Image (tube, rainbow, N blue to C red):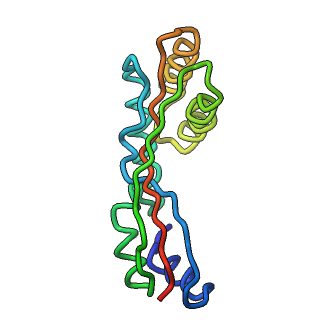
Amino acid sequence: MPDPQLLANRFSAALASGGVAVFHEYVEYGSFQLLPPRSEIGEFVQAVFESWRAQAGEPDIARVLPMLLDHAGFAVQSVRPIARCARRQDRLWHWPAGFVRINVPRLVELGVRDAAWGRRVISAINEAEADDRSIFVTPTVLEIIAVKR
């Protein structure tokens, strides 16, 4: 979003006084990792940062979202972090692994990284799925519940 304040304002305009908006937004995208650590996933996270910021996006938008909501006429009712971990046999594993598999080709297509890099990242995911010790730590999200004043 090139103008997150505009989006907050639009949410505010769409709700009557007392209306509730719930947001789940990244607050620490850099927490996205694979255990045991694999450098390819760290490189993937950096490439995502570069890609989103080049398109006027902010991966850690939850760091400023409470302020934006306040300016848009909301009162923040509650805030809580959500961090999750998944082992390869867990259904949740498919979210981070799938996100990597879908976005590696996109990052290569956008020219953020080259095809050889993409093959290394996908290979790291495949190797992790063959390792019972593997754990994905998802990016930390901030749940923000806000009430329209």
In the rendered view, would you say 63 is above or below 101? below
Q: Where is residue 136? Give x, y as percent.
A: 48, 27
In the rendered view, would you say 82 is above or below 144? above
In the rendered view, would you say 138 is above or below 146? above
One can see residue 123 in this view: yes
Q: Where is residue 58? Give x, y as percent.
A: 41, 59
The residue positioned 43% from the left and 25% from the top of the image is 34
The residue positioned 53% from the left and 28% from the top of the image is 86
One can see residue 53 in this view: no
The number of discs equals 0
Q: Describe residue 86's horizontal placement relative to residue 70 as left or right.
A: right
Q: Where is residue 50? Give x, y as percent.
A: 40, 48
Q: Describe residue 48's horizontal placement relative to residue 110 as left or right.
A: left
In the rendered view, would you say 50 is above or below 91? below
Judge by depth and name the residue closer to the eye, 72 or 104: 72
The residue positioned 36% from the left and 48% from the top of the image is 28
Q: Quadrant of residue 16?
A: bottom right
Q: Quadrant of residue 100?
A: top right
Q: Where is residue 8? Give x, y as percent.
A: 49, 78
Judge by depth and name the residue closer to the eye, 27 or 148: 148
